[in-house]
């Protein structure tokens, strides 16, 4: 087969924030490829640190936390254009030099070394924003930055359908905001965006079925809480995470930092989560009238998977 963010006043205020950020915002590993396995609808996500996770459309590491994958000799994650999984669960990887390989999720060229693929006339690998393989017929679908798509094989990307238009969920979610596209077993198309939003639809309407819901890179869905009353020039913070699936198999760490103008961020506490609902209080003595920023982070597998910033009241 050829493939193919709330100012805190001087009274206690509880802020529950449910934000998701892609790793790139924190200098963390970025997503280089995404696909959905036809056999079980598990979502596979490959990252720039040579790790791959397995999860759902909402929780990218729900089933397996990040673990290593290998590339063909001489290739790096930066060379990857996209990755797709065929009906037989073989993994196809397209590279920026117009070659494609096939293998497994952890060994990208196990079955077939790199060989050429052809793009539609006028298209370059840099124009591709997503690729995946339909489970129903193993056709390869490709989405481009100019809001066009094509259908073909792994070696001939427009063999079956040369060019047709598609649209994303909103003007905000431009093709350049896409981090990955995958096709599920029922042929629904899922698109993940840099702002932590995922949609589901068709190859031509990426938000037809579900226009916008949140995804996380690690243990979510979790809430970050920040309780910051002002007490005699001291600010007592209570920070934690809450959520029915927060305490997954993945290790979870909560960090609390304070940022003051002209000074580096100060780590107040870092604590491992030990239960589904987890809170830890910490006292920060501050003076003066300078505005502070409270930074809370949830970390899983060494990656910041959720973060929020909260304005802290003046100490006096």
Image (spheres, rainbow, N blue to C red):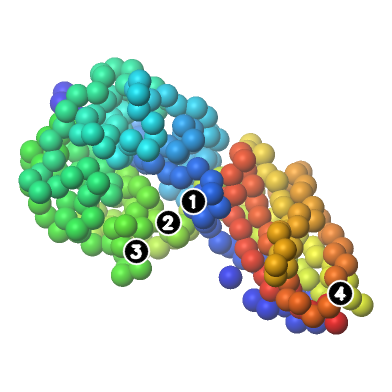
- x then y, percent, for residue 62: 53, 41
- x then y, percent, for residue 70: 42, 24
Q: Nearer the viewer, mark 4 or mark 1?
A: 4
Secondary structure type for disc 4 = loop
Q: Badge 1, how many Cα within 10 Å: few under 14, some, many 20+?
A: few
Q: Badge 4, how many Cα within 10 Å: few under 14, some, many 20+?
A: few
Secondary structure type for disc 3 = loop
- x then y, percent, for residue 127: 22, 49
Return the residue at label 3. Answer: 173
**Is 71 situated left or right of 287 in this image?**
left
User: Residue 194 bears which disc, if any?
Assistant: 2
Q: Nearer the viewer, mark 2 or mark 1?
A: 1
Gap between marks 1 and 3, in whole Å? Answer: 17 Å
Gap between marks 3 and 2, in whole Å? Answer: 9 Å
Q: Residue at x 45, y 39 (%)?
A: 47
Assess whether mark 1 and mark 2 are in contact (beta carbons under 8 angstroms): yes
Q: Considering the image in quadrants, where does the N terminus appear?
A: top left
In the depicted view, which residue is nearer to us: 7 or 247?
7
Return the residue at label 1. Answer: 24
Q: Nearer the viewer, mark 4 or mark 2?
A: 4
Return the residue at label 4. Answer: 287
Q: Residue at x 29, y 17 (%)?
A: 111
Assess whether mark 3 and mark 1 are in contact (beta carbons under 8 angstroms): no
Q: Nearer the viewer, mark 1 or mark 3?
A: 1
Nearer-N-terminus badge (4/2): 2
Nearer-N-terminus badge (3/4): 3
Q: Residue at x 77, y 47 (%)?
A: 271
Can residue 187 be seen at all in this image of the molecule?
no
Nearer-N-terminus badge (4/1): 1
Gap between marks 4 and 1, in whole Å? Answer: 34 Å
């Amino acid at each position: 087969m050829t493939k193919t963010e709330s100012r805190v006043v001087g009274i206690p205020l509880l802020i529950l924030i449910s934000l998701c950020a892609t790793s790139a915002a924190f200098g963390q590993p970025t997503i280089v490829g995404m696909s959905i396995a036809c056999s079980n609808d598990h979502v596979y996500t490959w990252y720039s640190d040579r790790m791959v996770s397995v999860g759902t459309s909402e929780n990218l590491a729900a089933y397996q936390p990040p673990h290593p994958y290998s590339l063909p000799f001489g290739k790096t994650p930066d060379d990857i254009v996209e990755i797709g999984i065929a009906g037989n669960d073989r993994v196809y990887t397209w590279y920026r030099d117009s070659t494609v390989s096939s293998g497994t999720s952890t060994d990208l060229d196990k079955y077939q070394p790199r060989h050429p693929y052809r793009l539609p006339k006028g298209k370059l690998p840099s124009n591709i924003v997503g690729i995946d393989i339909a489970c129903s017929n193993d056709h390869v679908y490709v989405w481009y930055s100019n809001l066009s798509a094509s259908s073909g094989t792994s070696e001939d990307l427009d063999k079956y359908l040369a060019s047709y238009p598609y649209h994303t969920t909103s003007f905000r979610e431009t093709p350049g905001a896409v981090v990955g596209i995958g096709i599920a077993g029922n042929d629904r198309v899922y698109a993940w965006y840099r702002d932590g939003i995922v949609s589901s639809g068709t190859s031509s309407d990426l938000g037809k079925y579900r226009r916008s819901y949140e995804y996380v890179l690690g243990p979510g869905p979790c809430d970050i809480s920040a309780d910051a009353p002002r007490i005699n020039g001291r600010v007592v913070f209570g920070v934690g995470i809450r959520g029915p699936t927060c305490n997954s198999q993945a290790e979870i760490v909560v960090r609390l930092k304070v940022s003051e103008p002209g000074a580096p961020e100060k780590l107040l506490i870092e604590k491992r989560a030990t239960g589904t609902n987890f809170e830890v209080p910490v006292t920060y003595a501050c003076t003066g009238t300078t505005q502070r920023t409270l930074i809370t982070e949830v970390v899983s597998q060494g990656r910041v998977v959720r973060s929020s910033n909260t304005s802290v009241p003046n100490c006096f």
